[in-house]
Image: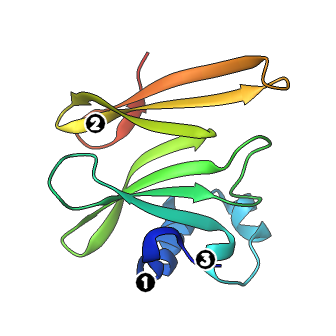
Amino acid sequence: MVIDNGINKFANELFRHILTDGVNEEDKAEIKDGPASEYISVKPIDLNGDGKPEYYIEGLKPPLMGMLAGKIWIYEKRNGSYFLIGDIGSFENVTPLKTKHNGYRDIQVSLSFNAGQQKVQSKFVFNGSKYELKK
């Protein structure tokens, strides 16, 4: 499987970061050897308008996927290292908004359930170091 948008070279490094700071020990034990592309999809997205991508990562299969949707993380590369700036949870739709907080676009997430009869929407905003759920 090819990682989205031709960024295979980042996938394995980002996958190692997810295993380090985005997944609990029980879930780590369930992950078998195999390429990162079996477990995650990586998409570049510029959330702060600096012309450099942040990375939207979605889990593709258990344990990096919830019952209804993949878990979502957002990483930023600074000074040659990747930093987790968003541990979003399991949602099926993630939409960057035009509104911003601390220079980063807000993110709206949604999840449909009960055969599409119910929908949950939430908004995440950047607090200066990471995305957090807006209450």
Q: Position of residue 56 (x, y in %)?
A: 45, 55
Q: Which residue is tagged 1? A: 9
Between the C-alphas of marks 2 and 3, the distance is 27 Å
Q: Position of residue 92 (x, y in %)?
A: 63, 40
User: Which of these two is toward me, 25 or 56?
Assistant: 56
Between the C-alphas of marks 3 and 1, the distance is 11 Å
- Residue sitting at 58 percent across and 41 percent down? 89
- Quadrant in which the C terminus appears: top left
Q: Residues within 10 Å of mark 2 (few under 14, many from 20)?
A: many
Q: Amino acid at mark 2?
A: Arg
Q: Amino acid at mark 3?
A: Ala
User: Which of these two is toward me, 79 or 42?
Assistant: 42
Q: Residues within 10 Å of mark 3 (few under 14, many from 20)?
A: many
- Residue sitting at 64 percent across and 58 percent down? 59
Kindly check if marks 1 and 2 are in contact, taking CB atoms under 8 A apart as contact. no
**Image position of 37 with respect to 112: above or below:** below
Q: Which residue is tagged 3? A: 36
User: Which of disc 1 and disc 3 is earlier in sequence?
Assistant: 1
**Image position of 11 with respect to 67: above or below:** below
Helix, strand or loop under label 3: helix
Q: Which residue is tagged 2? A: 105
Q: Residue furthest front?
A: 5
